[in-house]
Image (spheres, grey):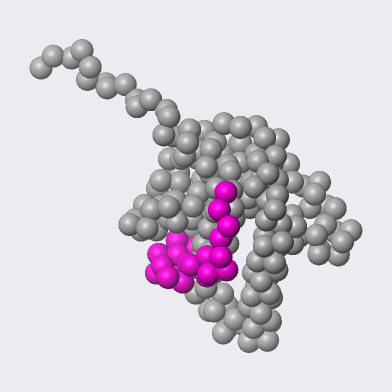
Amino acid sequence: MPTNAELRAMARGSLSGNWTSAVLHMLLYCVIQGVIQYFIEEMPFVGWVGNLLVSGALTFGLVSFYLLISRGEKPETSVLFSGFNRFVNTFLLSLLMSIFTILWTLLLIVPGIIAALRYSQAYYILRDNPEIGAMEAIRRSKALMDGQKGKLFMLTLSFIGWFLLTILTLGIGILWLAPYVYTAFGHFHNSLISRSATLPPPPNPYSGVTV
């Protein structure tokens, strides 16, 4: 696996020449979230239900957009809304991940964080495997993150300095920081699946055993 510094460098390389698109699409996503937040504040029940229904599709689209950037592609705006083409699975994935994470958080904060890290690859997996459902994406994410949760946690922490700097820009800097973070996460996922593909299969426990 690449180091955190290498993952950040890979993200900057992917964003080179793509910053305008990356920032504008993050702005579009933030505007949509702002509209949802407005409805939550003005019409709490309608806003809450609306957020519950669309959060999975929007997260799927956001993750897909920056994953494609990390793979050297130039995604179109339609990618940001691609989750609505798979509405049932993205809705179920968002709902199940929220329920599981909340249940773990009820025990303690740390188990909740671990659960969030365990399920972190589910949207990427669902995007790359359109034939599977939400539960299978979660199951594969748990397997893929085995032994890698600390790595992702430290990668996330490595952006704290940049996050603190965005406060000085009254939050505007998040439009640049968020694409940087999501693209780095995309490279993290790419490295995970590349590593998984090159690992040798486990030894056969029955090898050498005669029946």
Extreme residue in the bottom direction: 43
Q: Quadrant of the C terminus?
A: top left
Hey, which quadrant is residue 80 in on the image?
bottom right
Hey, which quadrant is residue 75 in on the image?
bottom right
Q: How far across and down, in percent of the image, does residue 81 sit? A: 52, 70
Q: Give 4 or 151, whichever is nearer the viewer.
A: 4
Question: Can the viewer see residue 178 in this picture?
Answer: no
Q: How far across and down, in percent of the image, does residue 91 sit? A: 45, 68
Give the answer, above or below, for where 44 lies relative to 84: below
Hey, which quadrant is residue 36 in on the image?
bottom right
Give the answer, above or below, for where 84 lies relative to 209: below
Question: In the rendered structure, which segment of residues is drawn in magenta?
Answer: 72-94
Extreme residue in the left direction: 211
The residue lying at 56 percent from left, 75 percent from top is: 51
Question: Can the viewer see residue 54 in this picture?
Answer: yes
Q: How far across and down, in percent of the image, does residue 153 sit? A: 64, 42
Extreme residue in the right direction: 168
